[in-house]
Image (tube, rainbow, N blue to C red):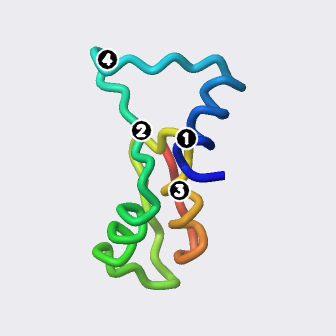
Amino acid sequence: MNLFEQTKELCRLYDIKPARSKGQNFLISEEIYDQMIVAANLQPNDIILEVGPGLGFLTAKLAKRVSRVIAV
């Protein structure tokens, strides 16, 4: 299942009805997430503070590469 389908399923499952007028947007490109990870130059012992983790797709990728992710 691609990120778009996963996003739709999570929204359906948790009755989330995003509205662009409220600034609610979801990134659905795996390639962009991967580029963000590379650009961050993460190290295995890093501790990351993620503000606004959304549905957690980036959070999951970060957690695989650093020692700790704190998502607020």
Assign a secondary structure to mark 4.
helix
Where is mark 4, residue-wise?
22
User: Position of 49 compared to 12: left or right?
Assistant: left
Classed neighbour count for the residue bearing mark 1: other residues with Cα under 10 Å, few (<14), some (14–19), many (≥20):
some
Measured in 3D between alpha carbons, the distance from the residue under mark 1 to the one under mark 2, in whole angstroms, is 8 Å
Measured in 3D between alpha carbons, the distance from the residue under mark 3 to the one under mark 1, in whole angstroms, is 8 Å
Classed neighbour count for the residue bearing mark 2: other residues with Cα under 10 Å, few (<14), some (14–19), many (≥20):
some
Assign a secondary structure to mark 2.
loop
Residues at marks 4 and 1 touching, judged by CB atoms closer than 8 Å: no
Residue 62 screen position, x and y as percent: 51, 66
Assign a secondary structure to mark 1.
loop
Numbered label attached to residue 55:
1
The answer to which of marks 3 and 4 sits earlier in the sequence is 4
Measured in 3D between alpha carbons, the distance from the residue under mark 2 to the one under mark 4, in whole angstroms, is 12 Å
User: Position of 1 compared to 21: left or right?
Assistant: right
Identify the residue at image location x=66%, y=52%.
1
Residue 42 screen position, x and y as percent: 40, 79
Q: Amino acid at mark 1?
A: Leu
Q: Residue furthest right?
A: 13
Residue 7 screen position, x and y as percent: 56, 38
The answer to which of marks 3 and 2 sits earlier in the sequence is 2
Numbered label attached to residue 26:
2
- Which mark is nearer the camera, 1 or 2? 2
Q: Amino acid at mark 2?
A: Phe
Q: Amino acid at mark 3?
A: Thr
Residues at marks 1 and 2 touching, judged by CB atoms closer than 8 Å: yes
Numbered label attached to residue 59:
3
Identify the residue at image location x=40%, y=46%.
27
Identify the residue at image location x=37%, y=26%.
24
The answer to which of marks 1 and 2 sits earlier in the sequence is 2
Assign a secondary structure to mark 3.
helix
| Residue 22 placement: quadrant | top left
